[in-house]
Amino acid sequence: MGYRHTIGATTYTFSSLRDLLAKASPARSGDRLARIAADSAEQMIAARMALADTPLAQFLQETVVPYEADEVTRLVIDTQDARAFAPVASLTVGGFRDWLLSEAASTQALRQLSRGITPEMAAAVSKLMRNQDLVLVARKCEVVTAFRNTIGLSGRMSTRLQPNHPFDDAKGITASILDGILLGSGDACIGINPASDDPAVIAGLLRLLDELIARLQIPTQGCVLTHVTTTLGLIEQGVPVDLVFQSIAGTEAANRSFGVDLALLRQAQEAGLSLQRGSVGRNVMYFETGQGSALSANAHHGVDQQTCEARAYAVARAFDPLLVNSVVGFIGPEYLYDGKEIIRAGLEDHFCGKLLGLPLGVDICYTNHAEADQDDMDNLLTLLAAAGVTFIMGVPGADDVMLNYQSTSFHDALYVREVFGLKRAPEFDDWLVRAGIARSDLRLVADAGLLPDFAARLIA
């Protein structure tokens, strides 16, 4: 089936749904690198007009990656909920956009719809939306998950405390955790990206997190972001594991490049659940994604990077995760060239993830060789806070000295909390008050220098 739209005397033809989605995408360097982007602004608009007229039901008939060749496609098609899809089944992509922006698309309606929407549908409608549309619709989506605290409630935003250290030094990591806790960060999780892949080092970091959380009775969860096979081995050895982490992508071949498939992820989820370490919930998985990962693995099948990213959310959705985040600017300017492209991609990712029913957070970030700066990140942070982002990163000074990229700081989280009146996970807020770190109005009372007793307990 071909797709076409005429502008003036020129008729633009698109060979497939995959080609149409690629040509309709906002301009970005990754799609240009893959040579699938629109050749001109006029062709891009023609593609969007043709996409707007495409029935949503077409996405159930025509796949962008062949069903028989890709387990992610099979997952998408085989788990699509026809009953949930029924309220919008007769709409075109353009009609779906209008519905999403209407009062009919309430929080409850969007929750009921989420399992009926495929990632390709979500990606398609996002391509027709302005930034403000992406903010407005995502804000109406509420996705709540729980482990030792409750994440995603309306009016709240969580933070992952990211205390990375270039040598996995326990004292350096503990100092960063102290910094973050005293500034009210860490309710999404305390998550370490290890510099080493040595299982013994990973085990030591997991025990460090477990001891700190238990000794101080912090209602949060720890995670060391190592490969899922390493985590499985450590679980078998009795090492304390709260969350099972894995990077994922939107095609079977891209996931294979990460060393995983759906069966392995299912095994990992079952292992995490078997530990029964949660107190208020059983969501044990933590996934990270990012536009460009399938392209960087040469595993994109000619699909644009944003649609590939949305397909990764279908993978995540199958495992009921506690946390999912797009590391939006981390892969580099080869995929998102500058601040404008990073901002747009971050809003797209958040919108698509929330629409698909995921607790979507964003690592608001850029690499040092991208045409972006911290003002761009401030803009995206503010837009995502307005859009109801589930969680962001808390990195000391916003500068990750291990991964060598720029993200958001503990103080950045305080900024958006102040501007938007956002609270943390309720159990974590209550603990901050009990620990003397926050007052009853949840304003922080002091820094590390004014809380010597607490600091001494943490670093003892």
Image (cartoon, rainbow, N blue to C red):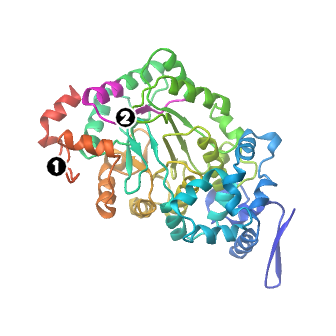
Nearer to me, 293 or 392: 392
The x and y percentages for residue 330 are 51, 48
> According to the image, label 1 marks what residue?
445
| N-terminal-most mark, 2 or 1 | 2
On the question of residue 387 being in view, the answer is: yes
Residue 211 falls left or right of residue 346: left
Range of the magenta residues? 208-227
Q: What's under tag 2, amino acid-wise?
A: His
Q: Position of residue 311 (x, y in %)?
A: 66, 48
The quarter in which the N terminus is drawn is bottom right
In this view of the protein, which residue sits in the foreground, 334 or 72? 72
**Residue hosting label 2:** 165
Amino acid type at circle 1 is Val
Quarter where residue 401 is shown: top left
Q: Name the residue located 54 percent from the left edge and 70 percent from the top edge.
A: 103
Q: Residue 133, how many percent across, how many down?
A: 54, 69
- What's the distance in space between the residues labelled 2 and 1, CA to CA? 27 Å
- Crowd rating for badge 1 (residues with CA inside 10 Å; few <14, some 14–19, many 20+): some
